[in-house]
Amino acid sequence: MRRLATPAAVFALAAVAVAVLPHLVSDFHAFQLANVGIYFIALVGLNVLTGSSGQISLGHGAFMAIGGYTSAILMANHGVRDLWTIPLAGLVAGGAGLLVGLPATRLSGLYLALVTFGIAVSFPQLLKKFEGFTGGTTGLILNLPAAPFGLHTSSNRWLYYLTWGLALVLAALAWALLRGRFGRALRAIRDSEVAAASSGIDLALYKTLAFGISAFYAGVAGSLFAIATAYVNPDAFPVTLSVVLVVGLVVGGLGSLPGLVLGAAFIVYLPVHSGTLLRWFEQVVPVDVSPKAPGVPSVIYGAVVILVLLVLPRGAGGLLGLTSRLYTRSYRP
Amino acid sequence: MIDFLQQVVAGLASGGIYASLALAIALIYRSTGVINFAQGEMATLTTYIVWSLHNRGLGFWGAFALTVVLAFAGGVALERVVIRPFESAPVLTVVMVTIGLFFLLNGLTSVLWGGAQRRLPENRPFPTATFDVGGVQISRLDAGLIALMLVTVAALFALFRYTKLGLALRASALQPASSRLVGIRVGWMLAVGWGLAAALGVVAGVMAAGSYGSFDPTLMQTILLYAFAAAILGGIDSPGGAVVGGLVLGVLLNLLGTYVDWIGSTLRLPVALLVILVVLVIRPAGLFGRTTVQRV
């Protein structure tokens, strides 16, 4: 049990931090932090796929869309309470993930990236096509989130507790899953498919499962996304959402849960603070660009991805791991 | 029948756009094994450069030619500065770098030119008037786009087949180690490959902007998927296959969109995705690709 002591302590600390944080910040910041939680859940799912099994998906925005629409349809057309739609959204997205995962097991990394990119590009078209079901281009409007059971808290704080409560549980589950037999099998597949297959690992089964689980996480994130914005339409889940998730994963670093929190924060806060970053940049290189220009966040996303891959191939998580190991003086490369 | 032929011609014209971009993707894939997700954004950015140069008083085709040269230089520079440091990184890392480039170039286009819709000048690249071939009404625009694509492909073919540079390019794509031994500077050949792909992007971008009538920073984002489908259909390491794949896909999508009401214009993208999936599952090498067997 001693091996579990440190992770359990980290988990307890994280839980305390999550519980205390909203009391220190304004209501608006609580909403932003809730968004960080949503992206964190999606990144944890993506990490199961990319970090462990080495498959790359550029289509997780589509699974978020499936989760978001499942929740929205249940809430808007069937009057289901938002809370109960979340697990269903995860399951529907997970099922879709298994379906995609089946042919995906035959594809090598690059081709899978292509196919999943295709899913991300074409999924909004499907949403527009089946408009009787999805509300077409106008989408579906939902009720604003409100705390259940007569709890007295603002809707933004309630969202915060909901997302981070789920995020903690789901992150702990992913961690437990990946450190056991399942995670070992995935890592074996990532490092060498041939070696994994000859040790008796069912490649197709594990790869498909990894895809399904990762889509489940994306579905939960999409459901929370729909609940938080109280609105879904095809443009809420654009291609760039899928690609931004990969950006978050690269910045956060594969395989590190604390790193993924940073990756999620990067996704949420970069567009908010891109004006400030631009002003810093202007101190060094005099450029004449309005901070309000629509492309500024994209330019910074792109530049940061390339720089991170160049300087910190293991992302922010890699840096965190390195410093903590230096601090405890047990650094082993 | 006349209507059918007209749709085939229109399909060939849009297929030409996919073919140009698919050709650029195949060129980079063949020499480096990387799929360049930024290819569409490279094309969009250079389309804006053509538009800007023309607005500054250059003739349209002059602006086009100048941009092709600039794009070639830009592509070479991009490879040397951004891609080269990842020479020995895993393929997936390089793919992520091209995704970073996707954001960088897309943002740059928006920063420099804004998000508004722009229009190419009247009757450019080609006038929209139609002419008659045995009852089939063909627009000059469609005919011009097909011709432009054919001229580009012919020029590239000549470059690869009849010049020393082309020979070196082919050699370093097929046998990098041996090429280095006979004195070819393989690194520079990869950079030239990126330059050619960027120059092809200008052709694809101008064709797409001309065919749509107007353009904005998202011009190539859906076309990129069609180009991927075309490249996969033709066999992703085969430049000739990319061209055939593009034309076949253009005609197929146009016919399905016109004659199958249920598909219409909304479901063309999902059909392209289906093409990718079916080809990859049934015949991963595509129509003309090399089947590779790997020893372990």
Image: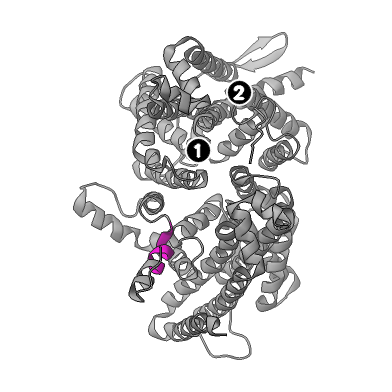
Q: Which residue is at a point 71% across and 66% down the rendered structure image?
A: A73
Identify which amino acid the numbered label 2 is placed on.
Val
Measured as percent of width and height from the top left, residue B210 is found at 51, 27
Q: Which residue is mark 1?
A: B36
Viewer-proximal residue among B169 and A155 = B169
Q: Provide the chain ID for the residue under circle 1.
A: B
Q: Which residue is mark 2?
A: B243
In magenta, the rendered stretch is: A314-321
Q: Which residue is at a point 41% across and 49% down the rendered structure image?
A: A302
* Predominant secondary structure, magenta span: helix
The C terminus of chain A, quarter of image: bottom left
Q: Provide the chain ID for the residue under circle 2.
A: B
| A320 drawn magenta | yes
Q: Against B113, is A148 above or below? A: below
Q: Against A151, is A290 above or below? A: above
Measured as percent of width and height from the top left, residue A236 is found at 57, 58
Identify which amino acid the numbered label 1 is placed on.
Asn
* Secondary structure under the numbered disc 1 in the rendered image: loop
